[in-house]
Amino acid sequence: MERLKKQIEFLIEIDKIKHVFRKTRLFDGSRYENDAEHAWHLALMAMVLSEHANKEIDVAKVIKMVLIHDIVEIDAGDVMVYDQQNRQLVTAKESAAAERIFGLLPVDQKEEFISLWAEFEARETPEAKFAAAIDRLQPILQNHLNDYHAWRAYGVSFAMLHASNRHVREGSEAIWNIVQQIFADARDKGALIQEPNAE
């Protein structure tokens, strides 16, 4: 009963992820997406797009990674990938959040979840590289379908897009090709800020 009690406590706690709103809008532009919706969408993307991974992957492991990767934002909040200054500051918060939130679980599950979360963050295994690729594809598609709303609002440049997303190529060359087409479209439509030495 103690094990079940811990698991239920964790499941109640992670309901808070539904209240963590991201900087990107739903595909139809009607409102901002929350982290729970983002994780669900990534899980389906992993199932649908896994054939485009650069290497053979364990799809179930990718699904686990993407379902838990943003749970730490319950404590740390959502910081846009292009906000490099705040991204660096939030790293310690996310580690503490992983310890606290996954620490609600029984020890074996805590260790599994922290290991999956850390693997995702490190982006070294084929599964983590692919998970990171689709984690970037999803908001890129959202921006594309919303006339680049977030990129315009936060002053994102072409160079920033490439610097923050080039790791997509490590997970999937095919997805990287799509992403580059979207970046070019955003540039051609004047949605990106100009930089003197933009790539």
Image (cartoon, rainbow, N blue to C red):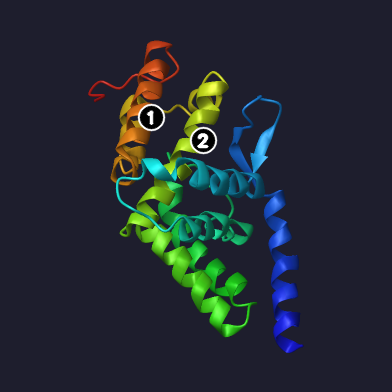
Choose between 16 and 86: the one closer to the eye. 16
Choose between 87 and 20: the one closer to the eye. 20
Residue at 40% across / 54% down in the picture?
88
**x, y percent for residue 40:** 62, 48
Choose between 86 and 46: the one closer to the eye. 46
Q: Give the alpha-carbon distance from disc 1 to disc 2, as whole Å.
A: 11 Å
Q: Are marks 1 and 2 in contact (CB under 8 Å)?
A: no
Q: Which residue type does callout 1 highlight?
A: Val
The residue at which mark 1 appears reads as 179
The residue at which mark 2 appears reads as 139
**x, y percent for residue 33:** 65, 39
Residue 146 badge:
none
- The quadrant of the picture occupied by the C terminus is top left
The secondary element bearing badge 2 is classed as: helix
Residue at 22% across / 24% down in the picture?
197
Is 60 situated above or below 18? Answer: below
The secondary element bearing badge 1 is classed as: helix
